[in-house]
Image (cartoon, grey):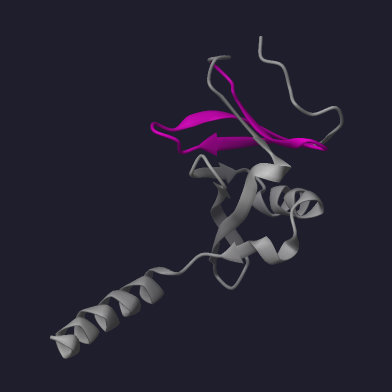
Amino acid sequence: MVESINTKVDLVENATSFLGLTDYGKIMIGDKGFEFFNDRDAKKFIQIPWEEVDYVLTSVMFKGKWIPRFAIQTKKNGTFTFSAKDAKKVLRGIRVYVDPNKIVKSLSFFEVLKRSVKNIFSKKDKQ
């Protein structure tokens, strides 16, 4: 059995982890960190202490009405992407422990497309 890093749990929510193949489980937000536990396999878990969180990236649709997924970017171990049944509730729970300025909105599809087209034409100007 996996030992939790939290001593006090604030929120438990059904979620999906997109690390490799999709894993279904539960997100646990507590006083020491963010945790994801797989429902089927106890060996598949993710534990991120709050000191390790660099940014929380959110994908926002329909002017904030729907948040399909969010990602936690760590200082050493990369980015972990999750989807939750109620993502707003999870992000509000994260906001208690992470500086709200470090919770940022990711770029939309059209913003990424616009940047790539802009970069293509700027590279031609430099040559």
Q: Quadrant of the C terminus?
A: bottom left
Q: Is residue 46 above or below residue 40?
A: below
Instruction: Examine the image and state in which quarter residue 8 appears.
Output: top right
Q: Residue at x 62, y 68 (%)?
A: 64
Q: Nearer the viewer, residue 17 or 118?
A: 118
Q: In which quadrant of the rendered image does the N terminus lie?
A: top right
Q: Residue at x 60, y 56 (%)?
A: 55
Residue at the extreme left: 127
Residue 110 x/y as whole percent: 37, 75
Q: Is residue 12 visible?
A: no
Q: Report whether 76 appears left or right of 3.
A: left
**x, y percentage for residue 34?**
69, 38
Q: Is residue 102 visible?
A: yes
The magenta segment: 11-40
Residue lying at 72% horizontally and 43% vertically, measured from the top left: 50
Q: Is residue 22 magenta?
A: yes
Q: Main secondary structure of the magenta part?
A: strand
